[in-house]
Image (cartoon, helix red, strand yellow):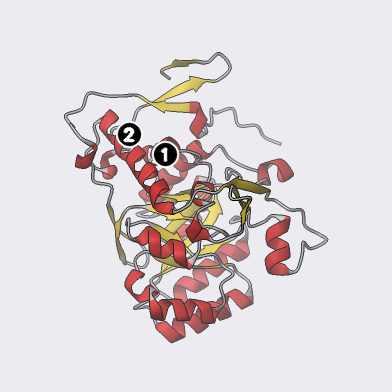
Amino acid sequence: MRIENDIKLDFKDVLFRPKRSTLVSRKQIDLTREFTFRNSKQTYSNVPVMAANMDGVGTFAMAEELAKSGIFTCLVKNYSANEVIDWIESTGKDLKDSWAFSIGTAPDDLIKFKSIYNEVGQEHMKFVCIDVANGYTETFVEFVRDFRSNYPDIVIIAGNVATREMTEELIINGADIVKVGIGPGSVCTTRVKTGVGYPQLSAIIECGEAAHELGGHIIADGGCTSPGDVAKAFGANADFVMLGGMLAGHDEGGGEVVDNKYVQFYGMSSRAANEKHFGGLREYRAAEGREVLVPYRGVVSLTVQDILGGIRSTCTYVGAARLKDLSKCTTFIRVTQQFNSVFVE
């Protein structure tokens, strides 16, 4: 047994320190980022906010709407191959830089990917999100390595992990972008059920540093409950920020509206998700996600405006004319929650 005594931080533990700025309007802020990915050599240029591959969020309709604002969507895993092919043929061809197909590591997942890829080709299928709850297994690393060997030009998103050594391991073995976050999501109960996790802000800082030293990239996945949290993730040097709960409850996510007020939202390891997609929860597993009713929010465009407007406002407070510069302009003030005061570390 070992105890690490270093301070680790979540979003709630810090605030941005405002700085002198020459910016006069939020209109001046450029939220686009341009990346060239380490292993696939593919490029990306857009707003690096992502919709999570969750029921009620990672839908075709959400991808189409978010693409209008330059935002990326990881499609939920549970679309059939034919559904994805039909969507690509009808709409997805024009959005290839704005979505990823999501898979796990089961043989059926790979079969589904191959059937879609063989039909539409890499020209129309640029990104894949290889998504598992525990990115620390040898079999997961082997899967990523084999996938890279077989599909050298596909941009591989892989995760989830929360420490620098596994971020490095995944990038070295073929991942372009590593998903960072274990347990911070609003409907994730991994920390409660297993006691496993890592404070998200510190995970972003440490994994981001590890990835960037190798020429890789990271996604801050989970824990954001407000536009300010999204800005903090970017300030901590995340390349992308993935959102689930903040994009749930909208028309584009589907789902039944209850009493004209609420929409069901659940984690993808919850009992509800297991019953919907896998015929129930296996006897050797515990549900690691909760089921909640989120407020019905109508069209997602208003929420997108709120999120992007908040990030722009953050940039004006710290003097960053481009999102690219936000981390360089960031000084975090650590907040002492117990005494409701702040001090500079």
In the image, residue 273 sits, relative to residue 314, either above or below, namely: below
Classify residue 99 by image quadrant: bottom left
Residue drawn at the location 39% of the way across and 43% of the way down: 307
Residue 326 in percent (x, y) is at 30, 38
Residue drawn at the location 45% of the way across and 37% of the way down: 229
Label annotation for residue 314: 2
Amino acid identity at mark 1: Pro
Classify residue 205 by image quadrant: top left
Asked whether residue 140 is in view, the answer is yes
Task: Quarter of the image for the C terminus: give it.
Answer: top left
Q: Secondary structure at mark 1?
A: helix
Gap in Å between the C-alphas at discs 1 and 2?
9 Å
Residue 116 in percent (x, y) is at 48, 81
Query: Which is more N-terminal, label 2 or label 1?
Result: 1
In the image, residue 124 sits, relative to residue 321, either above or below, namely: below
- How many dots with numbers? 2
Query: Which residue is the extreme one toward the right?
Result: 283
Q: Are marks 1 and 2 in contact (CB under 8 Å)?
A: yes
Mark 1 = which residue? Answer: 227
Query: Which residue is the extreme one toward the bottom?
Result: 119
Q: In front here: 249 or 100?
A: 249
